[in-house]
Amino acid sequence: MNSCVFPVAGFGTRFLPYTKSTPKELLPILNKPIIHYAVEEAHEAGLNEMILIDSENKQSLREYFTPGSYIDKALVNSPKSSMLNDLNQLIGQCNFTFIKQRKMLGLGHAIYQAKESIKNETFAVILPDDFCLSSSISVIQQMREVQKLYPGYCIVAVEEVDKSLVHNYGVISVQEKMDDLSSLNSGEIFLVDNMIEKPSVEESPSNLAIIGRYILTKEIFDKLEIVKPDVHNEIQITNALKMLCSEKKVLAYKFIGKRFDCGNTKGHLGACLEVAKKNFFLRW
């Protein structure tokens, strides 16, 4: 396992007018954009093949991860050039592949675009909008530890949400609880027997909601090829995973850490304040 897929083709309409000209993935958390944190999380978990599923309006996203930009050259003899060291080191240690999603037909459709680049390996998926912080190892690294214990399973990260909010998420139904990971400070693992995309409160099987971290086996592509589009003509990864649930091949991991939904202004502000507190305020 060496690859991580980042579905980043969306318009980011909840951040208009800012996203009229700038991809939402370049929204900063202090001085680093959200996508930078996401790639760092994957790299720190030992993943070096970064596959970004983007769209026609994301040229600046590609430029961000391209060495030798105009500003690199302009600052080459300036003390300020050191401010790009972390980014350039990250670029130098990873391989970046950009794949255009010509039509935005759902998360499952976006992930399927990576099939030829992934080939036959297990791979990770990170949705940069879900900004995760942990006092221990990162969420995707925690999930890699789960994958080592339970190879051959797809793994989804979950967190408890207020029951009134389940309509915003894919929600899992738990068949049984697996062994805890004492090394991960009591992260919980569940065998999933079903999941429902954006259920009503009445039909929701639990309050364990899927968030934007996945580890997927190559079998997911077979399911994505046959899954039917939903009422919005979108291919949902949840519906493909449901097929694997029936084969008892999906685990949910209740991770250690805190998640901020940076797809909206409230979550983005919360992430900024949390990182500021962690990096600055506690030093005062």
Image: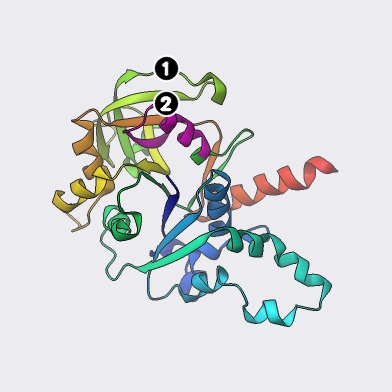
Element assignment for label 2: helix
Label 1 vs label 2, nearer the camera = 2
Judging by the rendered image, the residue that carries numbered circle 1 is 179
Which amino acid, by three-letter code, is at mark 1? Asp
Compared to 130, does 62 lie above or below?
below
Residue 48 seen from this side? yes
Query: Residue 175's spot in the image, x, y percent?
Result: 27, 21
Which amino acid, by three-letter code, is at mark 2? Leu
Please tell me how many numbered marks the rendered image carries.
2
**Cβ atoms under marks 1 and 2 closer than 8 Å:** yes
- What segment is highlighted magenta in the picture? 141-159
19 sits left or right of 190 in the view: right
190 sits left or right of 58 in the view: left
Q: Using the image, tell me which numbered label, if any, was put on residue 149.
A: 2
Mark 1 and mark 2: span between their CA atoms? 10 Å
Compared to 245, does 31 lie above or below?
below
Query: Residue 119's spot in the image, x, y percent?
Result: 31, 54
Q: Nearer the viewer, residue 92 or 179?
A: 92
Q: Residue placed at 64% from the left, 34% from the top?
A: 135
Residue 184 lies in the magenta stretch: no
Query: Residue 36's spot in the image, x, y percent?
Result: 57, 58
Residue 33 seen from this side? no
26 sits left or right of 245 in the view: right
